[in-house]
């Protein structure tokens, strides 16, 4: 028998696999019940644009051949949407892959990324997987980003700053004024990744990343089709950045990294902004319903700019476990700051009602 553990690089044994939100089918299997409600992965409960889904017919014709290697036609649509050149864009198998490609290209074992905490855990896992690191910088008490602390944490070895706006798991957002003041004070060779996975849901004043790139050459923005577009299983995200940055990433990007279904369906999805508008309106209604119900229960929560929210429930892990038994999957993130919270994705009207009823039951309210 081979001792595989003895063959891996030092550090791999300290890593644990990313734990995604529990799949519905898994809980069905475990509990032997149906009608499970999953509000754990910030998916869009209303689904994808019907126009995008109709494009599956086109995909059927392409299934036997390798996909287009550089996602040309999809990049063409993305470029038109953002009013940038096609060479400013690279597509990936989800924004997860974009983060990995960026890290592979620019992060070394003696440089690091920085990110506000709490934020998306993959910023750290992917860095560690590449024998580097992501250092977490605490946010303020209300989870807003402390840009002063972030700037103070920057040193000559800082290669990336990863900023999700709106942030996961807090739903908080920073303004363009705060961001511009931060960018003005940041050394130019620190690369700033604005992760806009939830930007479609944001309201108010937030940085116009693509426009700001004209001023800040170290700024790039990442988007995904997994959230507002309702295409999480397709695995497709993209990066808008400086052309040289994109061309360097292309040297390490695996050929055919974005499958043909994703390329064809996402190219249609991005053209259907009416669908996104409708999703955003429905999300807002759902959000207000949950705010209202949670307030009636006397619970604290964090106001959100995304399609999920943090609710302070006491023992977060216990509430998460009890909700599972009732067939409602939410997320417990734990860590230093979130022991007392659950994160719930905003679902359909009916799913939100099921969630609130389950929460009342679990909290004996
Ligand atoms: C902030 C943030 N960025 C990136 C991702 C990755 O999304 P995907 O790989 O599905 O594009 C997620 C997923 O939850 C996220 O919350």
Image (cartoon, rainbow, N blue to C red):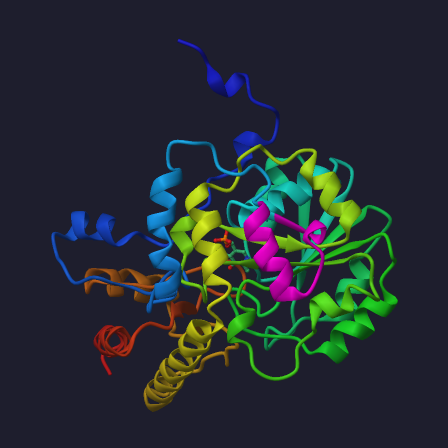
Tell me what residue is drawn at x 57 percent, y 74 percent. Answer: 172
Q: What is the x, y in percent for residue 245?
A: 76, 46
Q: Which residue occupies the foreground of this view, 15 or 93?
A: 93
Left or right relative to 199: residue 221 = right
Q: Which residue occupies the foreground of this view, 260 or 352?
A: 260
Left or right relative to 293: residue 257 = right
Task: State whether residue 77 appears in this view.
Answer: yes
Magenta-colored span: 72-90
Q: Is residue 58 above or below residue 333?
A: above
Instruction: Tell whether position 79 is magenta.
Output: yes
Specify the quadrant that holds the C terminus: bottom left
Tell me what residue is drawn at x 53 percent, y 30 percent. Answer: 13
Task: State whether residue 195 appears in this view.
Answer: no
Left or right relative to 340: residue 101 = right
Tell me what residue is drawn at x 82 percent, y 74 percent. Answer: 181
Q: Which residue occupies the foreground of this view, 78 or 178?
A: 78
Q: Is residue 215 above or below residue 102?
A: below
Which quadrant of the view contains residue 63? Answer: top left
Tell me what residue is drawn at x 60 percent, y 65 percent. Answer: 81
Query: How many numbered markers are drawn?
Result: 0
Left or right relative to 178: residue 16 = left
């Amino acid at each position: 028998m081979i001792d595989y553990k003895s063959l891996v690089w030092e550090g791999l044994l300290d890593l644990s696999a990313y734990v995604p939100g529990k799949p519905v089918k898994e809980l069905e299997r475990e509990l032997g019940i149906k009608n499970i409600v999953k509000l754990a992965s910030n998916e869009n409960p209303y689904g994808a644009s019907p126009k995008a889904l109709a494009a599956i017919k086109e995909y059927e014709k392409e299934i036997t051949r390798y996909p287009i290697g550089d996602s040309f036609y999809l990049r063409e649509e993305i470029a038109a949407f953002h009013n940038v050149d096609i060479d400013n864009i690279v597509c990936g198998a989800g924004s997860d892959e974009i983060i990995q490609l960026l890290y592979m290209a620019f992060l070394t074992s003696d440089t690091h990324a920085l990110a506000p905490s709490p934020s998306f855990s993959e910023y750290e896992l992917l860095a560690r997987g590449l024998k580097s690191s992501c250092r977490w910088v605490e946010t303020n008490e209300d989870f807003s980003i402390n840009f002063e602390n972030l700037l103070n944490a920057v040193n000559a070895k800082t290669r990336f700053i990863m900023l999700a706006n709106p942030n996961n798991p807090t739903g908080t957002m920073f303004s363009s004024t705060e961001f511009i003041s931060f960018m003005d004070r940041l050394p130019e060779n620190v690369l700033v990744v604005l992760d806009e996975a939830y930007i479609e849901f944001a309201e108010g004043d937030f940085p116009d990343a693509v426009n700001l790139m004209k001023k800040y050459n170290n700024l790039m923005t990442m988007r995904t089709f997994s959230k507002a577009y309702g295409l999480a299983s397709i695995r497709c995200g993209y990066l808008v950045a400086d052309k040289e940055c994109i061309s360097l990433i292309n040297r390490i990007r695996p050929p055919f990294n974005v499958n043909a279904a994703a390329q064809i369906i996402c190219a249609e999805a991005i053209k259907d902004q009416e669908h996104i508008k409708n999703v955003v309106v429905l999300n807002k209604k759902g959000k207000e319903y949950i705010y209202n119900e949670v307030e009636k229960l006397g619970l604290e929560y964090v106001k959100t700019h995304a399609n999920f929210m943090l609710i302070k429930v006491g023992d977060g892990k216990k509430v998460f476990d009890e909700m599972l038994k009732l067939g409602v999957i939410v997320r417990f993130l734990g860590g230093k700051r979130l022991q007392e919270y659950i994160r719930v994705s905003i679902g359909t009207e009916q799913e939100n009602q099921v969630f609130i009823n389950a929460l009342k039951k679990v909290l004996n309210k």
